[in-house]
Image (cartoon, rainbow, N blue to C red):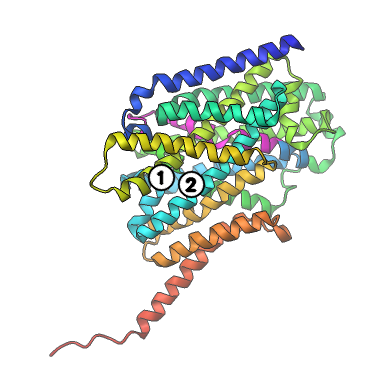
Amino acid sequence: MLNRAVILISVCAGYFVLIACTGYFVRRHAANSKAFVTGGKHFSPKVIAALLVSESIGTSITVGTAQTGFERGLTAAWVVIALAIGFLLLGWTLVERYRSTGLHTISAILEQNYGRSVRYGASVMTIFSLSIVTVALYAAGGALLGAILGLGHVTATLIVGAVAIFFVTIGGFRSVVYTNTLNAILKYVGVVLALAFALSASGGYSRLQVALPAHMFDVMDVGISKIIAWVLAGSGAMFASQYVIQGVVTVADARAAKRACYYASAMLVPFGIGVALIGLCSAHLYPGIRSIDAFPAVIAHMPAFAASIVVIGLAGALFGGISAATVASSTLLLRDFYELRRAGTVDEKRSLRFIRIATIVMGILPLILALFASKILLIAFLGKALRGTLAVLIVLCFYAPKFGTSRGALAGIVLSTVSTTAWFVAGNPFGIDSSYFAFVSPLVTMTVSHLHRQIGQRRRPPTQSLL
């Protein structure tokens, strides 16, 4: 047992040192605020695809999908497949339009059509949703490292936060890109190893079918309503995720950006099925544990070195997700608040100092809340669902720019934030997922504002021409 603990701790410690050093050594590429935000160069589609995958299947989604697989079975795979669908739709519909704007934030794009107030509202909403996702990531990381290394939840969560905040604050977006390429590879290998062990320990897939209830193998068991909600939340998150936009604008051209989206989509589907199967195996092997420990329990019983690979893969995805979210939030604070308020008097040195401080703050605040979080997957999808509102507005902005008004857009952001969060806190009454509120709210307010404007125009007396 001691040898196992030594191996796990040594491998994890070595990995933490590696990513921290990566952030430190690429710090010269984050010498100004623009390089901090974009990485200072063009990246290949495969590297950006690895970045997108690593951020999309962060530890909260992985541990949460296994948790749902433990509770509901194979239907949990839809959690990740929904994200794959989102990347496909993004590549087909919006990538070229995003790149054509020459802008790096969703809020700045919305300002072009709806004005400055909507930019502020969109920025606040995005920061809020990313912070919620970061809470889930920290909570998942604490649960994982605590179970594997025998640490208390608070201690494990604080360690995760300290390492993640350090390396992204030093290295910026380039450190996120480089480490997430490695993270995606390690995570894939780790899930394959964990699935192979779990299936072997369970006696194979046929044994699982005999031992577990039939509904656990029904891919539609969770219900079509929940699956649609997951697809909406996943697609909305991909359409309006700040770190996704930062990723697709750092490749050479629109064609390369589309390829990055398609690569990411293809990588996600088998991953989702594999993680759901791990949760299924855990339900058979360890029926008395908490569902949140479905994945950690499998890792805890694996051989030490294989378990170490799984742990650093999950840890890598964890740091990738946290880093992407904090960089995205600090980018919005810099572009939409600090620089706008100091227009014409922006000092590059002060901007770089501001974004580093903002990154630290946006890393610490969710860390505090994560100490009390438990429902990881639900929290993660609340954060993704909220961005569905911005996805609706982005689609309208690009494809129906004259529909609705600026007031309607701002009202949609406010209504969605309040109603979606309130419905989530209430426990999704009547089986209606909170994701629907995020999509319906802006459609309602934009439709009402559009009709109101048309009625007002019809009532306005015609202008008398002068003879």
Q: Could you tell whether 12 is left or right of 166 in the image?
A: right
Q: Which residue is mark 1?
A: 332
Secondary structure under badge 1?
helix
Mark 2, secondary structure of its residue: helix
Q: Which mark is residue 97?
A: none
Q: Which residues are magenta?
A: 38-66
Does residue 48 show up magenta in the picture?
Answer: yes
Q: Position of residue 262 (x, y in %)?
A: 48, 37
- Report the Cα–Cα distance between label 2 and label 1: 8 Å
Label 1 packing within 10 angstroms: few (<14), some (14-19), many (20+): many
208 with respect to 160 (left or right): right
Q: Which residue: 33% across, 56% down? A: 112
Q: Nearer the viewer, residue 376 or 334?
A: 334
Q: Nearer the viewer, residue 466 or 339?
A: 339
Q: Is residue 86 magenta?
A: no
x, y (%) of residue 81?
Answer: 60, 41
Frontmost residue, 86 versus 328? 328
Q: Residues within 10 Å of mark 2 (few under 14, many from 20)?
A: many
| As drawn, 214 above or below 281 | below
Q: Is residue 176 left or right of residue 459?
A: right
Q: x, y percentage for residue 197? A: 74, 21
The amino acid beneath tag 1 is: Leu
Residue designated by label 2: 127
Location of residue 117 by image quarter = bottom left
Quadrant where the image shows the N terminus: top right
